[in-house]
Image: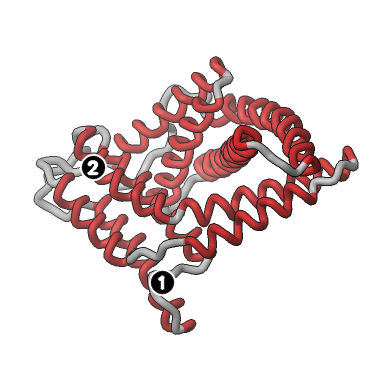
């Protein structure tokens, strides 16, 4: 049941715990390496971005009790911090995605993808050198302050109502993606599937066997949707290369071959996602019950 805001906001408390855990890791790394605390290592950049995703998932629990404008204001602050590190992280993901695909392609087709790998390796190095350090601790503190300011109301979020909202939203997007076959629909489904998964992981302390099975299915679906998203981002980067023009014939040939290969991989991703949709979202309502 939705409660009065006279007590501590349980969702905000969870958000604080997530932030404090990450800031502790950031401070520990800075102390151990004696480096600028604003410059994060790649693993910490990944941890920061995961933290922002979990914060955004928690934020969606307010949907049944708070206005869209207030939620959006906090969400924008979280996204701004995540986006500040997106160039560095996305370059890493694109290079790793390309390496995996190039290895698969070369084994089955024998074509040389090395010019393309070299290009993305150089791009990765450039992104690392040009990364602008922020003040993550100050940014997170500002986010939590804005959270309290914008979401201060008469009602506290209800965990079960929030979970129900996320499940139904993800389910709706899954069937829209299946019907339209549009890449963007799959991206939106990925976002809300992740929200729902993160919410379950943070709110369900002792899941029942069927809840564990659902979480396992959601993780598998989220991973496949994430893989699909990575392939789409790589596809966009390759198309930009072609549009800008390439002087290197071997590089242009590798780009064209990889784009053709990506289309087939994306088709397989969508087929696998559709199979997962049927298992994960077969019920019209969220079936996970929280204690208390």
Confirm whether residue 115 shows in the render. yes
- Does residue 255 appear to the left or right of 279 in the view shown? right
How many C-alpha atoms fall within 10 Å of the one at disc 2: few (<14), some, or many (≥20)?
some
Residue that numbered label 2 is attached to: 73
The part of the image, by quadrant, that contains residue 144 is: bottom left
Percent of width and height locating residue 169: 40, 28
Residue that numbered label 1 is attached to: 26
- Does residue 247 appear to the left or right of 33 in the view shown? right
- Report the label total: 2
Quadrant of the rendering where the N terminus is positioned? top left
Percent of width and height locating residue 137: 31, 66
The part of the image, by quadrant, that contains residue 170 is: top left
Front-most of 43 and 88?
88
Residue at 35% in and 46% down? 56
- Does residue 229 appear to the left or right of 73 in the view shown? right
The part of the image, by quadrant, that contains residue 219 is: top right
């Amino acid at each position: 049941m939705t409660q009065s805001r006279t007590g501590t906001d349980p969702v905000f408390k969870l958000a604080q715990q997530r932030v404090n855990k990450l800031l502790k890791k950031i401070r520990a790394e800075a102390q151990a390496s004696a480096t600028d605390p604003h410059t994060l290592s790649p693993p910490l950049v990944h941890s920061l971005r995961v933290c922002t995703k979990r914060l955004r998932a928690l934020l969606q629990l307010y949907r049944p009790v708070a206005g869209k404008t207030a939620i959006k204001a906090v969400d924008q602050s979280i996204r701004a911090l995540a986006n500040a590190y997106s160039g560095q992280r996305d370059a890493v993901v694109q290079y790793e995605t390309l390496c995996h695909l190039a290895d698969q392609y070369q084994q089955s087709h024998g074509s040389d993808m090395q010019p393309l790998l070299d290009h993305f390796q150089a791009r990765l190095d450039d992104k690392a050198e040009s990364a602008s350090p922020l003040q993550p601790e100050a940014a997170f503190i500002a986010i939590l302050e804005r959270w309290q300011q914008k979401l201060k109301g008469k009602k506290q979020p209800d965990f079960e109502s929030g979970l129900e909202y996320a499940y139904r939203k993800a389910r709706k997007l899954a069937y829209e993606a299946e019907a339209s076959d549009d890449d963007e629909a799959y991206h939106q489904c990925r976002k809300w599937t992740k929200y729902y998964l993160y919410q379950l992981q943070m709110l369900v302390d002792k899941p029942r066997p069927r809840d564990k099975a659902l979480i396992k299915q959601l993780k598998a679906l989220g991973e496949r949707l994430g893989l699909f998203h990575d392939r789409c981002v790589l596809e966009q980067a390759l198309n930009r290369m072609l549009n800008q023009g390439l002087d290197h014939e071997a590089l242009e040939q590798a780009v064209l071959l990889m784009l053709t290969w990506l289309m087939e991989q994306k088709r397989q991703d969508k087929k696998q996602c559709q199979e997962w949709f049927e298992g994960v979202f077969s019920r019209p309502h969220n079936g996970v019950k929280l204690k208390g």
